[in-house]
Amino acid sequence: MQVESRDSISLKPAELDELGQLLASVGLVGLDGELDAHVETFPLVVLANEDDARHGFLFGSLERVGGTPCILWGLGAARKGRQAGTVVKGMVGELYRRAAISFPDEDVLVAGRIGHAAAYGLLGSLADIVPRPSYTPTGEERAWGRRLAKRFGCDARYDDRAFSVGPRGTPDAVLDASTMKGGGKAATAIVGSIDVTIGESVIAFGWATADALANGIGHGA
């Protein structure tokens, strides 16, 4: 499996069509406009390929939000199959690798919109994950949720106490993890009955410490 990142603006129309077909194959249809928007708002795209076949993609951004270094997961998905978990973890790991270069010696906030327990499970190696079971978020953590909802363009539907994004009637831009296993009880408790096909999601985040990034967090998982 080859996993590489490049500038999202370099995606050609035929490649965008291919990504749209991959999204449709996992049940997220009608997101062509979101792909075009992500090219403008998420500078990076991670692509996973094997034998000239596209197995997954993930839009991402390494940026500072209010001065804090962040890894933001945008729209992404992996093709159905035995390698789906490896694909998603590899794409997330590539963003960690680039963050270690872009933000040396700094703790980094990692955040995304998710709708599956397996996607929440991707946060398991991070510190201070929010939301999490049996935990009351601080005011600052709730403020982070609002900042992220605004950055993701879904603040009008965002509940800052539940960290949830309400429905819009059609699929929205999430990191789709429907094709991979994982998560566990804690993840299921947080994601609950989220329905990504009508635009629902949870905004979840955690911290990748400088040491964890330097030691290759997300690689070899």
Image (cartoon, helix red, strand yellow):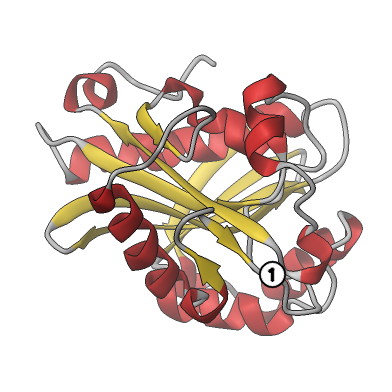
Q: Is residue 149 left or right of residue 186?
A: left
| Residue 87 placement (x, y as % from top left) | 67, 34
What residue is rendered at 68% in x and 42% in y? 191
Q: Is any part of residue 87 visible from this angle?
A: no
Is residue 23 positioned above or below 88 on the image?
below
The number of discs equals 1
| Residue 116 placement (x, y as % from top left) | 72, 42
Q: Is any part of residue 174 visible from this angle?
A: yes
Is residue 24 positioned above or below 150 on the image?
above
What residue is rendered at 78% in x and 26% in y? 181
Q: Quadrant of the N terminus?
A: top right
Q: Is residue 163 left or right of residue 99?
A: right
- In the picture, residue 215 is in which quadrant? top left
Is residue 164 positioned above or below 199 on the image?
above
Q: Quadrant of the C terminus?
A: top right
- For the residue pair 56 and 192, the one nearer the viewer reads as 192
Q: Amino acid at mark 1?
A: Glu
- In the picture, residue 201 is in which quadrant? bottom right
- For the residue pair 40 and 151, the one nearer the viewer reads as 151
| Residue 105 placement (x, y as % from top left) | 9, 31
Q: Secondary structure at mark 1?
A: helix
Q: Which residue is mark 1?
A: 15
Q: Residues within 10 Å of mark 1 (few under 14, many from 20)?
A: few
What residue is rendered at 16% in x and 64% in y? 66
- For the residue pair 9 and 81, the one nearer the viewer reads as 81
| Residue 153 placement (x, y as % from top left) | 48, 77
